[in-house]
Amino acid sequence: MKDIESLPPMSLDKFMQETGFSPVTIWRYRKKGWLETTNIAGRHYVTREAIATFNRRAGNGEFSKAPRNPSKKAVA
């Protein structure tokens, strides 16, 4: 098996296709600093190391939070 750093970066579009994440979800993850991307010639790429880091952090529950309960609406 190849060392993770020797693998080329994956385009962000291909990453979205393979994971099923929507563009908005990816934007939010990038904005929060959960997924690190690299700009190469004006296109966004994600390294295999960044993917591994994201998966490790998600597996450890770093991104989890308590579920929101629906608010009670006034019944007319």
Image (spheres, grey):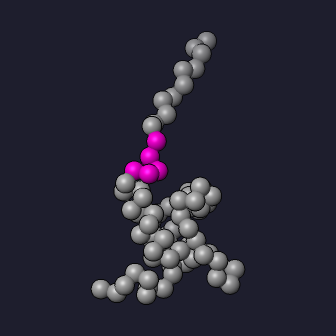
Q: Residue 33's image quarter?
A: bottom right
Locate the N terminus and report the quarter of the image it occupies: bottom left
Relative side of 18 to 2, left or right: right
Q: Which residue appears farthest toward the left when viewing the image?
A: 1
Identify whether 63 is placed above or below 46.
above
Q: Position of residue 12 (x, y in %)?
A: 56, 73
Count of all numbered marks drawn on residues in the image? 0
Q: Position of residue 32 (x, y in %)?
A: 59, 55
Identify whether 57 is placed above or below 67.
below
Q: Position of residue 6 (x, y in %)?
A: 43, 87
Residue 60 shown in magenta? no
Q: Which residue appears farthest toward the top when viewing the image?
A: 76
Secondary structure mostly taken by the magenta-highlighted segment of the chain: loop
Q: Which residues are magenta?
A: 61-65
Q: Nearer the viewer, residue 36 or 19?
A: 36
Q: Position of residue 14 (x, y in %)?
A: 51, 75
Instruction: Tell me if residue 13 can be seen.
Output: no
Q: Nearer the viewer, residue 49 or 8?
A: 49
What's the residue at 53%, 64% (across, down)? 35
Identify whether 72 is placed above or below 60.
above
Relative side of 59 to 40, left or right: left
What's the residue at 44%, 51% (across, down)? 62
Q: Residue 58's image quarter?
A: bottom left
What's the residue at 48%, 85% (across, down)? 8
Instruction: Tell me if residue 53 can be seen.
Output: yes
What's the residue at 41%, 69% (across, down)? 52
Q: Residue 59's image quarter?
A: bottom left
Locate the C terminus and report the quarter of the image it occupies: top right
